Image (cartoon, rainbow, N blue to C red):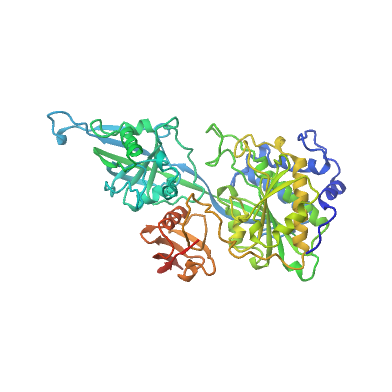
Amino acid sequence: MRSRPTTTHFTAVFTLVFGLWSGSSHAQTATTPAAQRIVDHVRVLASDSCMGRGPGSSGIEKAATYVMSQFEAIGLKRAGRASYGDPFTLTTGVKLTGSNSVSFSVVIERPGVPVDQTRPITVGWKLGADYQPFGFSESGSVKGDVAFAGYGLSTSSYDDYAGVDVKGKIIVVLRGLPGWAEKDESLRQLSSIRSKTTVARDKGALAVIFVNKNGDSADVLSRFGLDRLGKNSGILVVQARRSTCAKVFPPKGTSLFVAESEIEKTKKPMSFALANVTSNVTVGLSFEESTTSNLIGMVEGTDPTLKDEYVVVGAHYDHIGMGDENSLAASPEPAIHYGADDNASGTAGMIELARAVSASPLKRSVLFMAFSGEEKGLLGSKHWVSTPTIPLEKIAAMINLDMIGRLKDGKLNVQGLGTSSVWPAVIDSAKKGLPLTVTTTADGFGPSDHSSFTGKGIPVLFFFTGLHGDYHRPSDTWDKVNADGQVTVLSMVERALRMIGDAPARPDFAKGADKPAATQSSSMALKVTFGVVPDYSDDPQGLHITGVKPGSPAEKGGLEGDDIITAMGATTIKNIYDLMTALGTFKPGDVTTVKVLRDGKPRELTVTFVGK
């Protein structure tokens, strides 16, 4: 490994090549030519014309044109499939289409009048006011009796389904957990909406109506939009205002409030059929498919042998456009979410590292990647590692830059330290002499593009200056970027990059680092290891996997990359939530069947689970 450089090329290249930035507006902390250039990039990417850089939009196309013009000006070699571009398709939106309706037929008993001779009252709900479908619901129409299934939980210690048959019924389920269950890990891991949806579907329910617990937010509907981890659920799912839903509970029966109170008081289920109440639920959704592109440029290495190995420097350049389902804005009205820190800052840093490396190449080649689709579930980086333009075995390491524009008090977090035994020494050397307080995280998984590479056995480092109050809000604007601080961060990143790129040996990949330290796709604390690499994009047949971990229960059971998992034990698998729900029911030593489709043909495999 080459010793730590006494200086960094980053600021020097900026000064020599660009001189002073000539714009008339300046971020408060842009006091050097290097910092001014960062501001220049961020202002373009986080401008009105780029409209939040939502994948599939004209705004992200403008951002892509800008990034490619920078690659061209720097002199990067084209390393995509079409010039710098690496196009792929993705689901970019969901819309209500056709007929959407929820109605109830309620028979109110009257003294002396037989129920079968009583004319029912029809109650219709207003879309957007009384109820809203979830973006992961199936489309279709169902009709059935109505039942209340408590919190929709089903475990050996607490089962909301034990006292009620929900097969063929439309069920009302409370969101969250009762207060007494908040610290019960076995219940907490099953409390997500998607987990409850899977259980309801497998119990035979036709549709689920979710309502909030009693409280200040009881009548608040969640924002409608795509679910980050897939749209296939196998059942109709809507959410309703509590006050609206409570009115369909028969006046002579148990009310929603009383049922919830009893569960809280007794710590026992309180589920029941709603007497003489039937419902019709119709959901119509359509999904928008778009084409977007990763952008890839390369600086070839100088060593005749090592140049055939590559270090990836990546940053996602997409954001959430006018405010998609990931928006945290107070208002649901469309507004440009500028994404200056997330992740125009990382994209700007990637561009300027490309300029520095182009001016002074490393022994290894460096791929500079601007990913799209990160905000939709790391889709761009997953696409690339699944169909790489460079063989994966030639990728020595990956450095990810995401939200590096808000350095405060010199605090920088570097994640992925546990993916290679050499990383601690690299980070210790790279930070020396810089006004940074560096904290580290061992796990190489997380909500950004480095995770896609970790899952393929590639060592990663993820640089991140932290969350803030403007995250995923329209207020994440260019003028709030700490450009001077970002230059300091990039100085450290460049040092690390040069050590990796010039070292005689490529970094090792630490044993077990391809298994997340914590489950990222749900809140579950699983007791078992399975060992598959899921493809989070949708597949109508089940959950597509891109690989299996060597020596894992999945590999020993015969699963292979490109299998589509359709069932695990008694659980139908349509998405990652279904898989996590199924895994949460097993303990080490348990044996179960896993059904898969391989090359379109069904297979049934046997898997024996081991502990984590």
- Location of residue 231 in the rendering, given as x and y in whole percent from the top left corner: 46, 50
Splitting the image into 4 quarters, where does residue 89 fall? bottom right
Splitting the image into 4 quarters, where does residue 421 fall? bottom right
Q: Residue furthest top?
A: 111
- Location of residue 420 in the rendering, given as x and y in whole percent from the top left corner: 66, 62
Residue at the image position 27 percent from the left and 46 percent from the top: 164
Relative depth, front residue between 176 and 199:
176
Whether residue 427 is visible here, answered yes or no, is: yes
- Height in image: 406 above or below 424? above
Q: Describe residue 514's horizontal placement relative to residue 247 as left or right.
A: right
Whether residue 600 is visible here, answered yes or no, is: no
- Location of residue 23 in the rendering, given as x and y in whole percent from the top left corner: 80, 36
- Height in image: 249 above or below 562? above
Residue at the image position 52 percent from the left and 58 percent from the top: 535
Q: What count of labels does the image hold?
A: 0
Relative depth, front residue between 546 and 192:
192
- Location of residue 202 in the rendering, given as x and y in whole percent from the top left corner: 35, 53
Q: Quadrant of the N terminus?
A: bottom right
Q: Residue furthest left?
A: 112
